[in-house]
Image: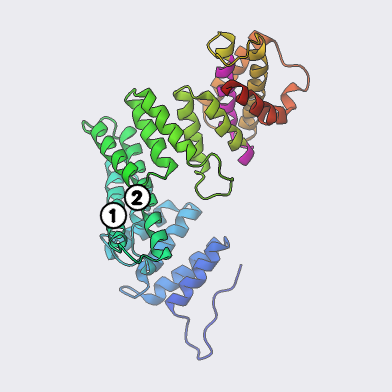
Amino acid sequence: MAPNRPSSKEGKPPNAGALLSDAETQFTVGNLDEAISLAQQALETTGEGGDFELRALNLLGTLHVETGDVDDARGYFERAVKLDTDGTVDEKLGGGSEKFLFLAQLSEEGGKDSVQWFERGAAALRKQIQQLSEVATGRTPEQQAALDEKQQRLGGVLCAVVEVYMTDLSWEEDAEQRCEALVTEAMMIAPSSPETWQTVANVRISQLKWDEARAALKQSLELWQDLPPEHPAVPEFPTRISLARLLLEVEMEAEALKVLQRLVSDDDQSVEAWYLGGWCLYIIGEKMRDGKDAAANGDAEEWKSVWKSARQWLSMCLKLYEVQEYEDERLGGHAVELRQSINKEIGEPVEGEEEDWEDASGDDDDDDDEEMQD
């Protein structure tokens, strides 16, 4: 770890701003303990009511989130809220929406408590967006980038509130109306965000509006599926896992398989990605077997090949499940049931079949996927 910043030649201790800059540098390179130590020194140096107090509190809150010290993180953010109650202080000074959004996620109560924190964060973002939008002409590239970023973030916050209303607060009388209002605003403010359309699809599924759900999922996919893996517009891994589940729910198996092939390419240790891929291929094969898939190309035995691939995905899932001591018993149980069903229909796997993971997730499946869409 890097040593603490030394005193100046005059014997004076470093100022809080310099300590915070050093703390942020240490955070960037992953030295969390050193970053916390420096940020704590900065907080003590600036003192209560000091110029750098808010910035120090926010940084300490973020650092403790990273280390998993949730109670400490919550305490720092709550102190920060008292200094910037509506999020209008300049972000360079530690103001803005971030502390509210963290507190929404760290809430012990969840439900309405999370929603009220999200709403305070959303209100702060709306004010920032309004200020940036008022620069109608002559907006600098930096200002435009800031506006785009705030709009994307607000869209994400609105989607997060929808998630709360569809889970913890689904019993509320106005839950559906609130969700509709939130997704409508999200579509207006962040139409280029895949998460927006994914959330719209989730709401439409809950309303049994299957065609609208499929249209929203297609819109979400079109925004990122042809982008390279490192592109910032590609959704986070957990978001794409949720996307795959939604695609399966609306019977868009071909699209789900493409998403899942990319997921296991990004992280071949994901139990859930292998499980969903196996389930997806099982459904595809089942439809072929039962004559419900018009793209089976007239090959009466093609479904067996697809089920062999499904078995490989499921076997990889169960192998990782055991190694990682995965805790989702329902997932593990369903994977076992699917594999047993396959074995009953097409026989036990031949020696070495289940070890050929490249066949399970590589070009062969891409070819199958293309055939199904022809």
Q: Quickly name the residue at label 2.
A: 154
Tag 1 residue:
126
In the image, residue 338 above or below residue 271: above
Q: Secondary structure at mark 2?
A: helix
Residue 179 within the magenta-colored segment of the rendering: no
Residue located at (31% from left, 44% from top): 188
The residue type indicated by label 1 comes to Arg
Q: Contact (CB < 8 A) between labels 1 and 2?
A: yes
Depth check, front residue: 196 or 268: 196
Q: Which mark is residue 172?
A: none
Is residue 157 shown to the viewer in this render? Answer: yes
Q: Which residues are magenta?
A: 265-285
* Main SS category, magenta section: helix
- Find residue 62 and report its horizontal and vertical position in percent: 44, 58
**Residue type at tag 2:** Leu
Q: Is residue 321 left or right of residue 86?
A: right
